[in-house]
Image (tube, rainbow, N blue to C red):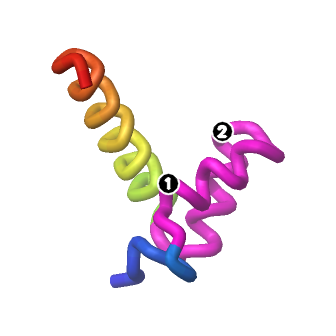
Amino acid sequence: MPELIVSRKTVADLFDDAHKEMDRDDAVMHVAGVTGHEPTTIECVLAARESLHTAAMECGA
């Protein structure tokens, strides 16, 4: 299984960098190509990050 960290950058970091220059779908495909993960895996990582962010906001963090 490919690592979720590439050159000390997380999938989320890679996505954020790519999303600055392209739309969301293209950024997901780019990160999938760089990491060797399926696009659905990238989407899951991003959804998990969003869930954590939402939970933190609800807890007042």
Residue 46 covered by magenta stretch = no
Residue 28 in the image: x percent, y percent?
60, 51
Q: Residue 26 — which label? A: none
Q: Is residue 42 left or right of residue 19?
A: left
Which residue in the protein does label 2 denote? 24
**Counting residues from the N terminus, which is met first, the one under dot 2 or under dot 1?**
1
Quadrant where the image shows the C terminus: top left
Q: Position of residue 21 (x, y in %)?
A: 82, 46
Q: Quadrant of residue 47?
A: top left
The magenta region covers 9-37
Up-down relation of residue 4 to residue 22 (above or below): below
In what element is the residue under mark 1?
helix
Query: Which amino acid does the dot numbered 1 rest on?
Result: Ala
Mark 2: amino acid: Arg
Task: Check disc 1 and report the residue beneath it.
Answer: 12
Question: Camera-side residue: 43 or 17?
Answer: 17
* Quadrant containing the N terminus in the rendered view: bottom left
Q: Residue at x 30, y 43 (%)?
A: 48
Query: In this view, which residue lies farthest toward the front?
Result: 61
Q: Position of residue 23 (x, y in %)?
A: 74, 38
